[in-house]
Amino acid sequence: MTVIRINAIDVPKDSGDELARRFAARAGAVDGSPGFEGFELMKPTDDRTTWLVVTRWADEASFDAWRTSAAFGQGHRSEAPTGDAPARPPVATNSQVWSYEVVDLSS
């Protein structure tokens, strides 16, 4: 049974492009994780400021294994300063993780 995890990320209007850049820089990082089925970054097209990170997993155990992995920790750490540049602050102001399972697939 496919499980869905949605990270609903609140992002100030002027920071959405930076969020997209940061995700693009990590594209494919989760692809090789056992049980991983897909990823989508969804940008709001109305006045909302909540972006959605949607991942699909074969089962709960696969998601939990990734969430507790070193790769997850590396991908979700704050960025360290480089050279004379200070560390980049987080883009999000808040986030929530929503959990779903697929109950019907139409053809």
Image: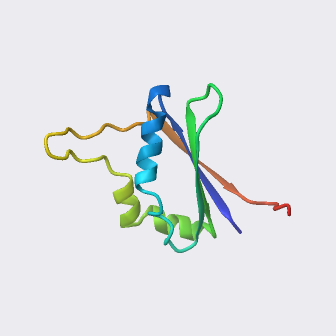
Q: Residue at x 60, y 62 (%)?
A: 38
- Quarter holding the N terminus is bottom right
**Horizontal relation, residue 47 to residue 9: left or right:** right
Give the number of callouts: 0
Asked where in the image residue 93 lies, by quadrant, the reply is top left
**Horizontal relation, residue 31 to residue 102: left or right:** left
Residue 5: where, in percent of width, then height? 60, 54
Q: Residue furthest bottom?
A: 34
The one of 60 and 55 positioned closer to us in this rendering: 55
- Quarter holding the C terminus is bottom right
Structure colour scheme: rainbow
Asked where in the image residue 14 lies, by quadrant, the reply is top left
The one of 83 and 10 positioned closer to us in this rendering: 83
Q: Residue at x 68, y 65 (%)?
A: 2
Q: Residue at x 63, y 69 (%)?
A: 59
Q: In this rendering, is residue 76 above or below 85?
A: below
Q: In this rendering, is residue 13 above or below 51?
A: above
Residue 32: where, in percent of width, then height? 49, 72
**Horizontal relation, residue 46 to residue 28: left or right:** right
Q: Residue furthest right?
A: 107
Residue 105: where, in percent of width, then height? 81, 62
Residue 26: where, in percent of width, then height? 42, 56
Q: Residue at x 28, y 47 (%)?
A: 79
